[in-house]
Image: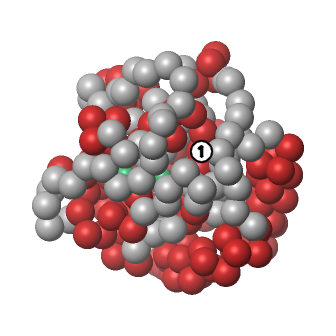
Amino acid sequence: VIGTALVSIASGAVFSLAEHLAPMRPRRRLREAFAHELPYIVFASMLPALVLGWLGATLRIEGPVGHAPLVVQWLVVLAITELSFYAAHRAMHRVRWLWPLHRLHHTPDATSLDWLAGFRKHVGEALLHGFVLLPFLVVLAPSPAVIAFNAALGIAMNAFIHANVRVRLVWLERVIVTPRYHAWHHAADPRAQRANLAAKLPFLDRLFRTHHDAAGWPDELGLGAQP
Ligand SMILES: [Zn+2]
Ligand SMILES: [Zn+2]
């Protein structure tokens, strides 16, 4: 819990500074952004993470990956987190009755998409991601430290991909999701909004043919594609 909180504070400080130094779009005041996103940070990010951590610590199941080297355990956890996120995210963009859970995440427009808005999420969406991921974690039972490390990385990456920063990271975009890559997922253009679904690894979009290959940045952000 302490490690995850420290990572949240550190990534908040880093991305606030980056947004101040090189903003891509008009910015909102930090205090305003905090006031708006705080309920989502608490109820859709911190609370589910605490419940997941508590469940992991309480269940204490001996799983098949629990004795593997930590790096191997992390690669397994990363793979299942990314695949389960991709599947749930794709379903929310395709299935009409799941869309209301995810609609909220696509409400930021050009002046409100920033690292804090990345946490804007319906509690139902957080629960859906938890329900899809939890069975895998229970069966494989990796070390709680590995789960905590992956969760902290997830928080930092979530802040990074939503950050309002003008950065060209062409070489990096092939390996990890970047602010420009994810900005296309927040584009008002429906074709772009149904694409670039991956949270960390863009190769998943290429593998499942949901990659939106466009140069530059989207002109307009906001709600675009309703299933
Ligand atoms: Zn989405
Ligand atoms: Zn997003």
Say left or right for 208 vs 125. left
* Location of residue 44 in the rendering, given as x and y in whole percent from the top left corner: 49, 76
Whether residue 174 is visible to the viewer of this picture, yes or no, is yes
Q: Where's the N terminus, which quadrant?
A: bottom right
Task: Give the amino acid at mark 1.
Answer: Ile
Residue 127 shows in this picture: no
Q: Is mark 1 within 8 Å of ligand 2?
A: yes
Nearer to us in this view, 108 or 2 = 108
The picture places residue 154, in percent across and down from the top left corner, at 59, 53
Q: Nearer the viewer, residue 36 or 54?
A: 36
Q: Nearer the viewer, residue 160 or 75?
A: 160
* Percent of width and height locating residue 99: 23, 63
Badge 1 is on which residue? Answer: 161
Residue 170 image-quadrant placement: top right
| Quarter of image, res 30 | bottom right
**Vertical position of residue 104 compared to residue 73: above or below:** below
